[in-house]
Image (cartoon, helix red, strand yellow):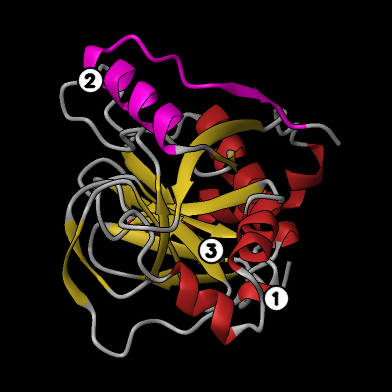
Amino acid sequence: MQDVRFLMTGDTSILVEFGNEISTEINARIRAFNIALEKKGVPGIVETVPTYRSLTVHYRPEVIRYEKLRETLQGLLGSLDEVEIPPASVVELPVLYGGEMGPDLGFVAEHNNKTVEEVIKIHSAPEYLIYMLGFTPGFPYMGGMSAEIATPRLTSPRVKIPGGSVGIAGSQTGVYPIDSPGGWQLIGRTPLKLYDAQRETPILLQAGQYVKYRPVDQAEFDDIAAQVAAGSYVVKTYSKEG
């Protein structure tokens, strides 16, 4: 595979780059490569981190040298078509759109010559692939949002955005897991906690999963928030079809 590049990103990591664009095909190759690497069980690998177009492999140089690791990684590329990628799951995120929860919903609608209702319908229609996590713990970078509602970032970022806020930046959509600064247009909020340090699995979402936003009203939002606080809410997930 001549289009795959290996880049030394430090003395303990190597980046394997599969392309230069956001696409489901590149993401599938990254997932296949990551699965093949896990099955290989290479001693010295500490962690692998997927991004939109690459996989970063962190390793212990006292266990495996760079040259040997690169050779091992290169050897996996020829068998990616044989890797069976497990069916992806879809995680449903209930979202209360607009109002205090989504102060920029009106601007997004006006910017795209849509009604607020049209923006909500368009935004909540797809199942969004999570390409990568980052920025803050568990922040999902997703692709597949309709260009009909694409909106530029804020010219001046907010100092504090509440955790759970659902945003749009250009043609991307994402959710702020914790209170943090940010410059995305806020259109709603989910009562679910994408990051909870006290939970057995602190980060709710994973790269390779899909997210489906489900619009809810204030009453349902409050009810779910109460269940989340009590630890009794069961996050709805299902297998992606197709």
224 and 133: which is toward the camera: 224
Estimate how packed mark 2 is, as few (under 14), some (14 to 19) or many (20 or more) residues with alpha carbons within 10 Å: few
Vertical relation: 19 (above or below) 66: below
Q: Nearer the viewer, mark 3 or mark 2?
A: 2
Question: Is the Cβ of the residue at disc 3 closer than 8 Å to that at disc 2?
Answer: no
| Residue 39 appears left or right of 169 | right
Q: CA distance from mark 3 to mark 1?
A: 22 Å
Distance between the alpha carbons at the discs numbered 3 and 2: 33 Å
Q: Is residue 137 left or right of residue 80?
A: left
Disc 1, SS: helix
Q: How many marks?
A: 3
Determine whether the residue tagged by mark 3 lies in a helix, strand or loop: loop
**For this rendering, which residue is in front, 214 or 5?**
214
Label 2: which residue? 229
Q: What type is the residue that disc 1 sits on?
A: Glu
- Residue labelled with disc 1: 148
Residues rendered magenta in the picture? 218-240
Q: Which residue is mark 3?
A: 52
Residue type pointed to by label 3: Tyr
**Please, what secondary structure does the residue beneath circle 2 have?**
helix
| Chain-order first, disc 1 or disc 2 | 1
Q: Quadrant of residue 4?
A: bottom right
Q: Position of residue 101 (x, y in %)?
A: 34, 54
Question: In this orientation, which residue lies closer to the viewer: 225 or 172?
Answer: 225
